[in-house]
Image: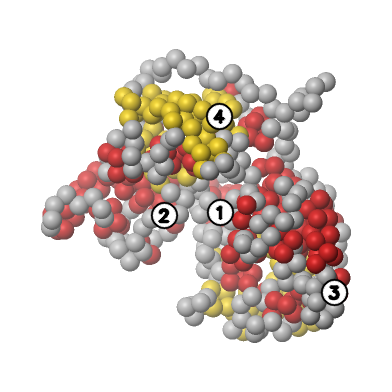
């Protein structure tokens, strides 16, 4: 057996003969370098007109770079772009739009205090007078909403509509500007399951009306559910293009990573012990003084993972920051091992760590790392006064470096270079650095926010296994994730937050995605279960 037998073999590309409707997009031998990094290497990609085409790959595979070239954010170093059969040199995003290529970004580009209509028109006014532009846009918006099933109130203010509605506005903006090919970058990351289903129906309608959709996502379930064809990228290269109906998630994962990947979380039943973390009547405000956590109470036992599900922005971030001492609470209490913690003030987080609570924050770059520091320096953040690193004002640098090297080995951080700045590690390896620092302390309680956000499939598998191992070692774990699949796979109990309130509790073994999705939209547990049963055929 050769040394490469465990590496996924590249299947033959899908037949390149022109489809009945022709090619909407053809990319040939696209190359792009950023210094020494070869982000795109001789990329070939053909997207049939009137189809939904998925693009998947690990972090750093080159997906976003390739789509940025197509949309005019970057210019390829070499290669050819053809749009509807004609060779084009796309110079910027305005040029791309003029050629019928639109893009809906992961983070919406909307003005919150403008109306839907004003956002659609913004930058596309057709006269020096705003009123005629708005009147014409209103008529065109009504036509687009009817044709593509994209209903949204044109007079509603953006900040007053749901995230799913805001995404519709982004799609309408692109269609209003004449997009025939629509690129969507991780479009479901901020949606409830029901909103994601609504989006899929919209995309199917767009396809049926002759539009072309390119979908960038790391969620293989979505690829299988909505796309006609899928292309897989790995390390800057295009390794396969397949008909979706002729592949499966396991094959796609293997092509993405280059080895077999276990897509499911394997864990035994939990054996909960005594309560280690208690949150009582917690009230927390954001930086503007707006209350985001409203009288929340729950507990986490030893040997148990409690997951908090919810659409981003419903108080989860403020809850985690208050529980870990990073944000003052207005009222309520946090108890660790039955002892009430004093978490207010500048040293709240330090007191939490000293009491046995470790924290993996939601935003690793802003809150978990100092990216300008070397890896070994980040490995001791928050723990530099530990006796193993010396006593008094002097730091035992040799001991710190040795501990950092051991953490890198145990958590498979690559490259295993403690002197490398953390800004130069991939997102998945940055996350492993934070996890290693916090988990290696053998805490009684681990609070984890978005454990696999922006992390590729191979690292996700590793991180999930580490979390399960901590649970099985008798630790209490509080997990917050916007990924419903992740919550359902890891958690032993699920709490759902909406508008700062715990609206329900569910058993992940029995709760349906529909039930959880309704709770995430603000419907209480009982009503959500009843509504989910009514929707079941």
Q: For residue 475, which numbered disc appears in the image?
A: none
**Considering only vertical position in the picture, is 125 above or below 147?**
below
Please identify, in this view, whether the residue under mark 4 or under mark 2 is nearer the observer.
4
How crowded pointer 1 is (Cα within 10 Å; few <14, some 14-19, many 20+) is rated as many
Q: Alpha-carbon distance for marks 1 and 4?
A: 35 Å
**How many angstroms separate mark 4 from mark 2 (CA)?**
28 Å
Q: Earlier in the sequence, mark 3 or mark 4?
A: 4
Residue 254: x and y in percent read 68, 32
- Residue under label 3, please give it: 390
- The residue positioned 54% from the left and 59% from the top of the image is 311
Q: Residue at x 57, y 41 (%)?
A: 36
Whole-angstrom CA distance, mark 3 to mark 4, is 50 Å
Q: Label 4: few (<14), some or many (≥20) within 10 Å? A: many
Q: Which mark is residue 108?
A: 2
> From the viewer's perspective, is 186 left or right of 391?
left
Q: Nearer the viewer, mark 3 or mark 1?
A: 3
The answer to which of marks 1 and 4 sits earlier in the sequence is: 4
> How many C-alpha atoms fall within 10 Å of the one at disc 3: few (<14), some, or many (≥20)?
some
Q: Residue furthest top?
A: 17
First-in-chain label (3 vs 2): 2
Color scheme of the displayed model: secondary structure
Q: Secondary structure at mark 3?
A: loop
Residue 171 lies, with reference to residue 439, above or below; the image says: above
Secondary structure, mark 4, is strand
Task: Between label 3 and label 2, give the one nearer the viewer.
Answer: 3
Asked if residue 57 can be seen in this view, the reply is no
Compared to residue 309, the image places residue 412 above or below, namely above
Residue under label 4, please give it: 238
Percent from the top left, x then y, of residue 236? 57, 35
């Amino acid at each position: 057996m050769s040394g490469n037998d465990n590496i996924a073999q590249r299947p033959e590309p899908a037949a390149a003969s022109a489809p009945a409707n022709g090619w909407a997009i053809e990319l040939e031998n696209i190359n792009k370098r950023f210094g020494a990094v070869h982000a795109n290497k001789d990329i070939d990609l053909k997207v049939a007109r009137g189809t939904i085409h998925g693009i998947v790959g690990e972090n750093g595979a080159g997906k976003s770079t390739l789509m940025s070239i197509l949309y005019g954010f970057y210019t390829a170093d070499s290669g050819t772009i053809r749009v509807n059969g004609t060779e084009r040199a796309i110079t910027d995003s305005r040029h791309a739009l003029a050629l019928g290529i639109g893009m809906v970004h992961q983070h919406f580009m909307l003005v919150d205090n403008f109306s839907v209509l004003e956002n659609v028109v913004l930058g596309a006014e057709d006269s020096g007078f705003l009123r005629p532009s708005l009147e014409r846009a209103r008529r065109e918006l009504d036509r687009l909403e009817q044709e593509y099933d994209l209903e949204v109130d044109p007079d509603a203010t953006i900040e007053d509509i749901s995230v799913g509605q805001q995404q519709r506005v982004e799609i309408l903006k692109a269609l209003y500007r004449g997009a025939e090919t629509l690129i969507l970058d991780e479009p479901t990351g901020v949606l409830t399951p029901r909103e994601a289903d609504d989006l899929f129906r919209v995309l199917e309608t767009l396809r049926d009306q002759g539009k072309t959709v390119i979908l960038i996502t790391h969620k293989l379930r979505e690829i299988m559910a909505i796309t006609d064809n899928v292309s897989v990228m790995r390390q800057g290269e295009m390794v396969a293009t397949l008909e979706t109906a002729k592949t499966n998630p396991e094959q796609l994962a293997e092509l993405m990573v280059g080895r077999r990947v276990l897509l499911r979380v394997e864990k035994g039943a939990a054996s909960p012990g005594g309560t280690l973390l208690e949150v009582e009547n917690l009230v927390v405000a954001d930086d503007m003084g707006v209350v985001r956590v409203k009288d929340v109470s729950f507990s986490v036992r030893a040997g148990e993972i409690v997951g908090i599900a919810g659409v981003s922005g419903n108080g989860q971030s403020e809850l985690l920051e208050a529980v870990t001492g990073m944000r003052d609470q207005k009222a309520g209490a946090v108890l660790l091992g039955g002892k009430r913690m004093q978490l207010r003030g500048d040293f709240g987080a330090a007191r939490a760590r000293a009491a046995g609570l470790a924290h993996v924050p939601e935003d690793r770059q802003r809150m978990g790392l100092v990216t300008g520091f070397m890896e070994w320096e980040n490995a001791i953040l928050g723990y530099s006064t530990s006796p193993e690193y010396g006593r008094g004002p002097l730091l035992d640098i040799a001991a710190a470096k040795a501990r950092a090297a051991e953490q890198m080995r145990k958590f498979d951080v690559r490259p295993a270079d403690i002197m490398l700045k953390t800004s130069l590690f991939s997102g998945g390896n940055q996350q492993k650095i934070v996890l290693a620092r916090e988990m290696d302390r053998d805490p009684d309680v681990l609070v984890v926010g978005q454990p696999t956000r922006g992390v590729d499939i191979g690292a996700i598998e590793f991180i999930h296994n580490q979390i399960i191992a901590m649970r099985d070692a008798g630790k209490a774990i509080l997990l917050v994730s916007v990924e419903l699949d992740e919550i359902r796979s890891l958690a032993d109990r699920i709490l759902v937050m909406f508008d700062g309130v715990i609206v329900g509790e569910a058993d992940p073994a029995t709760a349906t995605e529909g039930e959880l999705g309704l709770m995430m939209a603000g419907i209480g547990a009982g009503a959500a279960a009843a509504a989910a049963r009514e929707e079941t055929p």
